[in-house]
Image: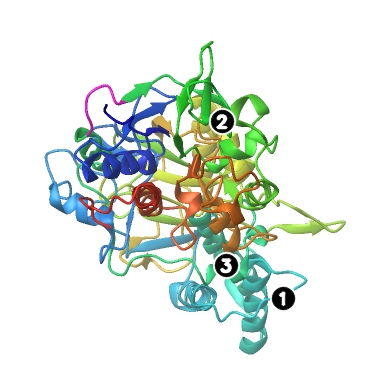
Amino acid sequence: MVAKKPRVVIVGAGMAGLTAAYRLHTASSGDLFDLCIVEAGHRIGGRILTSEFAGNRVEMGATWIHGIEGSPIHAIASDIAALAADSIPWERMDGYSQDPVTVAEGGTVVDPSLVVAPITALYRRLMDSARAGDAPVDVKRPGVGPFLRRGLKEYRASRGGTGDGGGDGWSLEKLEEAVFAMHEFTERTCTSAHDLNELDLAAEGEYRDYPGDQITIARGYSRIIEHIAAVLPPGMIRFGRRLQRIEWCSRGGDGSPVKLHFEGERSAMAADHVILTVSLGVLKAGLGKGGGETSGVAFSPALPVFKREAIEQLGFGVVNKLFMEMSGGCGEVGGQFPFLQMAFAPEEEENGREVITKRVGEIPWWMRRTAFICPIYGGSRVLLAWFAGKEALELEALPDDEVIRGIHATLDAFLPTSVTRGADKVNGHSSSSSNGARIARVKRSKWGRDPLFLGSYSYVAVGSSGDDLDLMAEPLPGWGEEDNEDPTCPPLQILFAGEATHRTHYSTTHGAYLSGVREANRLLQHYRYTSASLAQ
């Protein structure tokens, strides 16, 4: 009599889920497990989604390989020649811009040597200190935001004196504030935190990137996902199966301890093990912590306290990208649209609360914490801006014509018809503009309101720590009786994978990849199967 194969159901066909499936399937040539993937949507990739816009290849989600030395994502991309250019130009094909021009609201070109270079160097020193783990933490205000502001205050005290920032009512102090804030806005999109006061300073010392260059993938991030999925047998991925509830420690008649209940289906799916890779946003929604309960996954019995607390305490933010196609024959500065860094008028306080001072035109509030607008590569007529937090959610809700009006108001404020203040040239760019930069159409991501994600990626919020990321990765029930409140309940019924379950590589695709390998290996070890066919 042939022994029954353990039934493993993987929830989610993103990076973590597909990697776990690849590992389990290839480790035993498909002979060890009865394996399937259930995906709520109708495509693979999760928060990886390559698209095209105005004849260019763009990434709506994951964009960068964060370091190439030792990165499993870079290794796959290299092996399948996804890094090789083809006929379609792609986003950031020329890497990070080394030639930005910084303009203050109203059109003042900010002096690079007087303001931009020293403030940028200061900001980088502070963040390097935070990531090295040697930044002093104020127990009363333990966030990254207060640490950065203390650094700016100390810099100003050491510099001494005041000065003219370049005209148009801009003092040196206001320009320094605006340029420093510009870097903070970029940090928000890197971390997904709406407010850097909410980002835990101590945890910054644990986050890791791989060494080496940070690059984009010429043929699209989706090529990585497609390569992994191509190894899986036809029919293994089942689309349109939206999970609503997981019963575990079940005493069903078929002997399987886990039952999965899907939207619109009367019958449950039985499993011995479930690898759950849904986003932290969906898990939070299941606890009633944002997104609405109907968007989340419920558990019966309820998750143990340690798991619920980790889900609640960790941060999960929204980051969106806005692509803009310029109409023909306008908006050129020095022959092309610049990498425009925007120094907005500093926020002022009124009755102890921050309010926005509008200096020029009617720039909408959701544009005012955007650090830059730039071509997706040098000379491209497609521009890009990043948004985080409440601004990102607002961007999702607006009609295209209102978005375009907001962009035009911003461009008019930063690239007016005649900019005569400041240096004639900054980093090779002319400080005068014919203006008229106009947007014909836009394309944007909408991760925050998508019920399958409810956000973009995780961060360690004040009140949580790296320990919570480890707790996110803990399976239910645990390995042995000491981890299992009911020793008659088989172990490893629910395993957790995804970027929010990796202590040092959270918020990244390689973190999701590594978590999928980790949980697959956990099952292989459980069944004492040690053959390896996927790079670890």
- Under tag 2, what secondary structure? loop
Residue topped by disc 1? 138
Span shown in magenta: 232-236
- Distance from the alpha carbon under mark 1 to that under mark 2: 35 Å
Of badges 1 and 3, the one in the foreground is 3
Residue 25 placement, left or right of 164: left
Q: Nearer the viewer, residue 182 or 455?
A: 455
Residue topped by disc 3? 203
Chief SS of the magenta region: loop
User: Compared with residue 486, is residue 405 higher up or lower down, i.e. above or below?
Assistant: above
- Under tag 3, what secondary structure? helix
User: Compared with residue 157, is residue 380 higher up or lower down, i.e. above or below?
Assistant: above
Q: Nearer the viewer, residue 483 or 433?
A: 483
Asked if the magenta segment contains residue 513, the reply would be no
Could you tell which of marks 3 and 2 lies nearer the N-terminus? 3
Quadrant position of the N terminus in the picture: top left
- How many residues crowd around disc 1 within 10 Å: few (fewer than 14), some, or many (20 or more)? few
**Label 3 amino acid?**
Ala
- Distance from the alpha carbon under mark 3 to that under mark 2: 28 Å
- Under tag 1, what secondary structure? loop
**Label 2 amino acid?**
Arg
Of badges 3 and 2, the one in the foreground is 3
- Distance from the alpha carbon under mark 1 to that under mark 3: 13 Å
